[in-house]
Amino acid sequence: MTTQPQPGSAQFNALTAGSKIIGTVIADNDIHVDGTIEGEIKCTGKVVIGENGFVKGTITCQNADIQGKLDGKIDVKQTLSLRASAHLQAEVNTQVLIVEPNAVFNGTCNMGKSVAQPQPQPAQPK
């Protein structure tokens, strides 16, 4: 669902609480998730997972602000912020990681400019 902004404000997409998407979400603007997404988010802007939001899958974005839950993988080109209410079980790639007290993060984290562009995985032999 796309929300039309007031004059002078930025556009963003929103998935409200009680809504669920299974599949791939591609967003050219910021996206705010208060519902559930199972699959993949590809966003050229900022991804915000609200306190009631849950994403199971892969996120690729410019910046991210996590207040809810993520189970999967996240590739952030710039800054990933984990708020106090965040719960992550994830593989993280980002340039900058900000973690508030009480945020829960279980997984791996690769940081720095070298991870800004995830490297393709080599093909598996058949």
Image: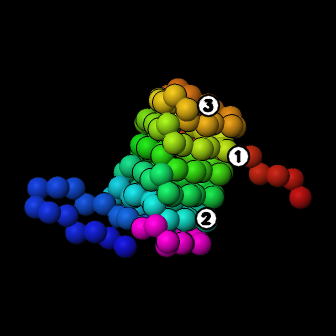
Label 1 or label 2, whichever comes before in sequence order:
2
Depth check: give the residue in front, 12 or 68.
Answer: 68
Q: Is residue 47 above or below residue 83?
A: below
Q: Is residue 69 above or below residue 23?
A: above
Q: Quadrant of residue 26?
A: bottom left
Tell me the magenta residue range: 16-24
Residue 23 within the magenta-colored segment of the rendering: yes
Residue 80 seen in this snapshot: no
Q: Position of residue 40 (x, y in %)?
A: 57, 61
Left or right for 43, reference 74: left
Please name which of the two marks, 1 or 2, marks the residue nearer to the observer.
Answer: 2
Mark 2 belongs to which amino acid?
A: Gly
* The disc label shown at residue 121, or none: 1
Q: Is residue 93 above or below residue 96?
A: below
- Mark-to-mark CA distance, 1 and 2: 19 Å
Residue 108 seen in this snapshot: yes
Label 2 or label 3, whichever comes before in sequence order:
2
Mark 3 belongs to which amino acid?
A: Asn
To which residue does mark 3 refer? 110
Q: Position of residue 62 (x, y in %)?
A: 42, 45
The structure residue drawn at horizontal position 66% and vertical position 51%, both measured from the top left corner, is: 72
The structure residue drawn at horizontal position 35% and vertical position 55%, both measured from the top left corner, is: 30
Mark 1 belongs to which amino acid?
A: Gln
To which residue does mark 2 refer? 39
Left or right for 19, reference 89: left
**Where does the C terminus fall, quadrant-wise?**
bottom right
The structure residue drawn at horizontal position 62% and vertical position 43%, both measured from the top left corner, is: 88
The structure residue drawn at horizontal position 59% and vertical position 72%, both measured from the top left corner, is: 22
